[in-house]
Image (tube, helix red, strand yellow):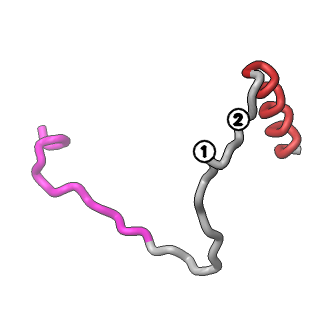
Amino acid sequence: MGGNVAKIAKEDLENKLDESVISKENSLDYKYTDKPKKLKINKAPHGNGMFNK
């Protein structure tokens, strides 16, 4: 169902713009992988004054 909604929205926008909204220039470059990616979390340093009042 969600794919159909996206298709209709895409077609509607293309009709209004009179051009394609998908092209080689604006396509996403990503790869699928089965390996989980570890995310690095940066913590704010203590005593930066932001929450210390």
Q: Nearer the viewer, residue 44 or 1?
A: 1
* Residue 13: in magenta span: no
Image coords of residue 18 (percent x, y): 77, 22
Q: Which quarter of the rendered picture does the N terminus lie within?
A: top right
The quadrant in which residue 22 appears is top right
Q: Residue 26 — which label?
A: 1
Residue under the image location 78 percent in, 34 percent down: 10
Give how far apart the Cα atoms at labels 1 and 2 are.
9 Å
* Residue 50: in magenta span: yes
On the rendered structure, is 49 left or right of 37?
Answer: left
Residue type at tag 2: Val
Residue under the image location 77 percent in, 28 percent down: 14
Residue hosting label 2: 21
Question: What secondary structure do most residues of the magenta stretch adopt?
Answer: loop
Q: Nearer the viewer, residue 1 or 43?
A: 1
Q: Nearer the viewer, residue 43 or 36?
A: 36
Q: Which quarter of the rendered picture does the C terminus lie within?
A: top left
Image coords of residue 41 (percent x, y): 34, 64
Residue extent of the magenta highlight:
39-53
The quadrant in which residue 42 appears is bottom left
Q: Residue 52 — which label?
A: none
Residue type at tag 1: Asn
Image coords of residue 23 (percent x, y): 68, 44
